[in-house]
Image: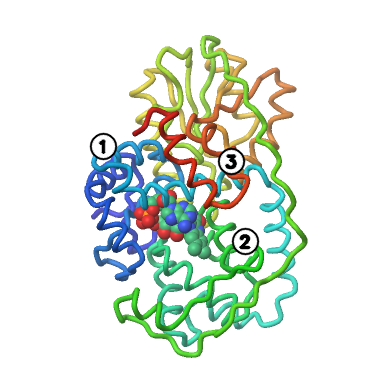
Amino acid sequence: MTQAPGLPAETDFPPSRQAALDRLAGFAPRSGRPYELGRNTDPGPGRPGAVSRLSPYVSRRLITEQEIVTTVLAHHRFETAEKYVQEVLWRTYWKGWLQMRPFVWTRYLETLDDSRSRLVDARALTDAERGATGIAGFDDWALELVRTGYLHNHARMWFASIWIFTLGLPWALGADFFLRHLIDADAASNTLSWRWVAGLQTPGKTYLATTANIERHTEGRFAPGGLARVAVPLTEPPVGAARPLVPLPRPDLRQPFLLLVTPEDLSPESLLPDGAAIQGAVVAADPALSWGEAGRRFTQVAADDAVTRAAGHFGCPVNRMDRLTAADLAAAAQAAGVHHILTAFAPVGPTAQALAQLAPELVRAGITLTPVRRDWDEAFWPGATKGFFAFKGRIPGVLDHLGIS
Ligand SMILES: Cc1cc2nc3c(=O)[nH]c(=O)nc-3n(C[C@H](O)[C@H](O)[C@H](O)COP(=O)(O)OP(=O)(O)OC[C@H]3O[C@@H](n4cnc5c(N)ncnc54)[C@H](O)[C@@H]3O)c2cc1C
């Protein structure tokens, strides 16, 4: 396989929508029982497993959750593919949960700063990150993450558990290590999963990695000794109740506009209905909108892919924007002859932060920036007020409402 320069040497995630569609087409027939039975097994890098490995694509929305679920349900009855559909909906759940509690992200960033400044044993952190702790499996996953930009879900759980409870390292530094190396790095899925392992997300309930479980689900590749035998939950001040989502008025798509495409949603062709008065588009490939080198490189190549697709789909000028600034956006709007910019709603994370920072300057330039939320998020996110158990009970009804069954 030809590898895009800058991506980890052993990654197998070509950064294009076509690669995502091909992967989904290959996986969909296996998304029923084979997924359910095999999804907890991590056979190791380079070996075929039961999971879809679609996360880098869906995290940048080169392919959407709706497309994935629709394709899977074209192959199977809901009951057959229920486990896979639920896993896809974990992502949606985490996104909605964090969107209604954005202060949990801010708290993570503060905890990260705090953990860095208070770190007593810098060597322990370095050893963990470079896979030099001597713990079988853990060291291999640290190296695999850096080499490939990906880890199996079970390996992420074991790794986070050992990081927190065996090595006694601050959870936020582990979450940061993941964000810097995962190609699918995502503010919601990563932060809330680390919190879940640590016992913060479901207060009092932790995830303890055990030798037997690791040995069984790595098919005997690893059987680490000396793991923590108990996982005492971390504590924090209460998170508080969810804030309702801010309702977004539907934009008037007959009014001429420029489309801003960001790394939060690189499928502009399915964002808007046909006939919208689009005059041009810009695709933001700003490195500041991603975390580590691998994620950045993946996003930049995927942004070029989005430029080509958007130009073909909309038949209007589409440009890549290497830095997302109010001045450059205003200039792009002016070149398109519009005062109105639409963009896919950016959930909690670096893109949302960047857009919030530049919005006042756009207003001063007489330009409106209007977010558009996908029907999928609009329908599912409000249900993420409590735990996943309550959320998953609503899945069939919401899919019905969206016309997917
Ligand atoms: C500590 C920790 C950190 C994580 N960090 C991230 C992250 O930064 N970005 C990220 O996308 N996922 C993260 N996950 C969730 C999960 O591990 C990955 O989404 C999954 O391993 C991706 O592989 P896959 O596409 O083969 O998954 P599959 O099993 O094939 O699942 C299909 C899709 O469902 C979604 N999904 C599956 N499981 C989960 C889950 N537990 N939580 C959220 N979404 C899920 C993903 O979008 C995935 O692509 C994390 C999990 C843990 C335990």
Res. 250 mark: none
Q: Residues within 10 Å of mark 1 (few under 14, many from 20)?
A: some
Q: Is residue 308 left or right of residue 249?
A: left
Instruction: Return the residue at label 2.
Output: 202
Image quadrant for the N terminus?
A: bottom left
Question: CA–CA distance between discs 1 and 2?
Answer: 35 Å
Choose mark 3 or mark 2, whichever is in front: 2
Whichever of labels 1 and 3 marks the residue nearer the N terminus, that label is: 1
Q: Is residue 6 visible?
A: no
Q: Amino acid at mark 2?
A: Thr
130 and 272: which is toward the camera: 272
Question: CA–CA distance between discs 3 and 2?
Answer: 22 Å
Instruction: Return the residue at label 3.
Output: 347
Residue appearing at x 56%, y 76% in the figure: 163
Instruction: Return the residue at label 1.
Output: 74
Q: Is residue 100 above or below residue 212?
A: above
Whichever of labels 3 and 2 marks the residue nearer the N terminus, that label is: 2
Q: Position of residue 146 (x, y in %)?
A: 44, 67
Image quadrant for the C terminus?
A: top left
Q: Is residue 103 left or right of residue 131?
A: right
Q: Is residue 109 above or below residue 77?
A: below
Cβ atoms under marks 1 and 3 closer than 8 Å: no
